[in-house]
Image: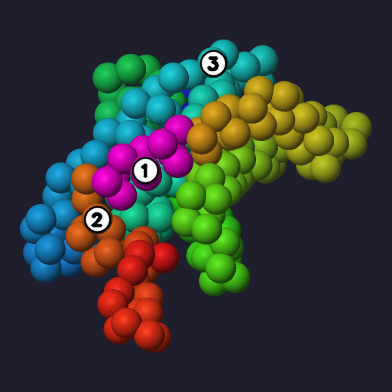
């Protein structure tokens, strides 16, 4: 998914950097506030960042000039909300550009916009929608991670189509080509990421129940007859 170094025209690279900057700045403020008010959350923040780094480093070559891989952003978005995930995702993409030659500095803004901003917001929106209508936690987590992964590639397809429109069919023709190529590899990867995220969330429920309750992932409901509270 990471668009390679130098692959975008300079004007597009600058524009995506400008578009991403406000989200990252807002995310830095949210992250700073979270760490200052709840220093005990640093371990879970680190785990969310590491989850994103490892999964998004598993790149599979693609004929589009990009590559396919899980993104790992759905978990962090569900736990800490999308603004903080914008920061964790940006740090991940920066390290991968500098240390793994995965993505690039000139395309960092475009990659941040797709993987660290739109993907987490889309996944978190799906997760919140399902939870609002009473869908069980793990089902909502699966679809949250699935959508975060898939929307990242949808945005990447739009970015590439804008930069390289088809000579005959224009933007829509290019979008169809890029999207269809990504979809072949990305849908099964998105399913796999959803299942893996559910497994990780199950472990967190067992080991960090108090922290997940504070973050609003685990809800408590009071029994009307006994007055006792149980997890929902």
- The residue that label 1 is drawn on is 202
Q: In the drawing, does residue 169 fall left or right of residue 216? A: right
Q: What stretch is highlighted in magenta?
A: 196-206
Give SS at disc 3. strand
- Of the numbered discs 3 and 2, the one sitting upstream in the chain is 3
Q: Is residue 205 magenta?
A: yes
Q: Which secondary structure type mostly characterizes the magenta part of the structure?
A: helix
- Of the numbered discs 1 and 3, the one sitting upstream in the chain is 3
Callout 1 touching callout 3 (CB < 8 Å)? no
Res. 31 image quadrant:
bottom left
Q: Residues within 10 Å of mark 1 (few under 14, many from 20)?
A: some
Q: Where is residue 167 in the image (x, y as percent from the top left)?
A: 85, 30
User: Residue at 52% across / 38% down in the picture?
Assistant: 194
User: Residue at 30% across / 74% down in the picture?
Assistant: 229
- Of the numbered discs 1 and 2, the one sitting upstream in the chain is 1
Q: Position of residue 226 (x, y in %)?
A: 32, 82
Examine the rendering and report whether any part of residue 15 can be seen. no
Quadrant for the N terminus in the image: top right
Give SS at disc 2. helix
Q: Is residue 213 magenta?
A: no
- The residue that label 2 is drawn on is 209
Q: In the drawing, does residue 17 fall left or right of residue 12? A: left
Q: How far apart are marks 1 and 3 (CA)?
A: 28 Å
Callout 3 touching callout 2 (CB < 8 Å)? no
Looking at the picture, tell me which residue is in the foreground, 164 or 173: 173
Q: Where is residue 27 in the image (x, y as percent from the top left)?
A: 30, 59
- The residue that label 3 is drawn on is 60
Callout 1 touching callout 2 (CB < 8 Å)? no
Give SS at disc 1. helix
Quadrant for the C terminus in the image: bottom left
Q: Position of residue 223 (x, y in %)?
A: 37, 79
């Amino acid at each position: 998914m990471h668009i390679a170094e130098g692959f975008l025209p300079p004007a597009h690279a600058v524009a995506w950097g400008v578009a991403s900057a406000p989200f990252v700045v807002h995310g830095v403020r949210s992250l700073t506030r979270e760490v200052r008010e709840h220093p005990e959350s640093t371990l879970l923040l680190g785990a969310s960042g590491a989850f994103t780094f490892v999964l998004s480093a598993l790149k599979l070559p693609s004929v589009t000039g990009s590559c396919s891989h899980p993104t790992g952003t759905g978990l962090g978005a569900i736990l800490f909300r999308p603004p903080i995930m914008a920061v964790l995702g940006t740090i991940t993409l920066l390290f991968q550009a500098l240390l793994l030659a995965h993505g690039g500095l000139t395309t960092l803004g475009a990659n941040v916009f797709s993987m660290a901003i739109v993907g987490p917001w889309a996944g978190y929106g799906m997760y919140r929608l399902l939870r609002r209508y009473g869908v069980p936690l793990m089902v909502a987590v699966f679809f949250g991670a699935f959508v975060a992964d898939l929307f990242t590639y949808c945005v990447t397809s739009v970015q590439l189509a804008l930069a390289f429109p088809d000579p005959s069919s224009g933007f829509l023709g290019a979008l169809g080509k890029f999207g269809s190529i990504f979809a072949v590899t990305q849908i099964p990867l998105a399913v796999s990421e959803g299942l893996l995220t559910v497994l990780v969330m199950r472990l967190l429920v067992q080991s960090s129940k108090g922290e997940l309750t504070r973050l609003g992932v685990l809800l408590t409901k009071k029994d009307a007859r006994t007055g006792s509270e149980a997890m929902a």
